[in-house]
Image (tube, rainbow, N blue to C red):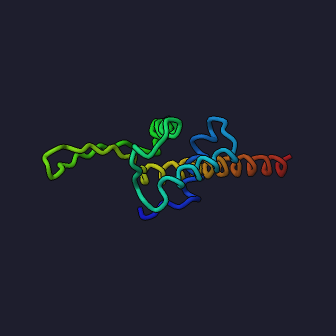
Amino acid sequence: MGVLKRSILIRALQNVYGARGVSHVDVIALCDFILAFFGYEDYVLDNVLSSPERDAFYDLEESGFLKTQREELTLPKGKIWRVNLWKLKKEEIDRLSKAVKVEEELKVKYENIFREIEENEDILD
């Protein structure tokens, strides 16, 4: 998956957080919050986050949108520099964006079946 599209992220957030009772306006605000950090990148350095932002990222990690990663680099003087990153789970976000769509398709399919049954009952009466 290339660059994460805003529409896909909104749909995934709506499917997860909307199901928990979060309003659509707040879902859009959360999407913009995420994209403000990531932009066109797949990762964000942890040290740029404030404590409340980090808390939000931990919640997003629990919901399947982000993951943490640690990298170690050896500096020229032999010291090890540890870098903590937050990475977008693009494949999981794509899957989450499609989750309700499948449920909605099944719902429409079953509604059509029941509608046909009701119509046929009217004909038989």
The residue at 75%/49% (across/down) is: 115
In the current view of this chain or complex, which residue is farthest to the left?
78
Give percent across and percent down for residue 103: 59, 46
- Depth check: 121 or 73 in front? 73
Residue 108 vertical position relative to residue 40 in the rendered view, above or below? above
- Depth check: 106 or 72 in front? 72
Left or right: 54, with 101 as reference point: left
In the current view of this chain or complex, which residue is farthest to the bottom?
2
Give percent across and percent down for residue 58: 46, 36
Which quadrant does the N terminus fall into?
A: bottom left
- Depth check: 117 or 5 in front? 5
Residue 98 shows in this picture:
no
Give percent across and percent down for residue 119: 80, 51
The residue at 14%/49% (across/down) is: 77
Left or right: 87, with 106 as reference point: left
Residue 50 vertical position relative to residue 4 in the rendered view, above or below? above
Report the label total: 0
Give percent across and percent down for residue 104: 63, 49
The residue at 66%/39% (across/down) is: 22
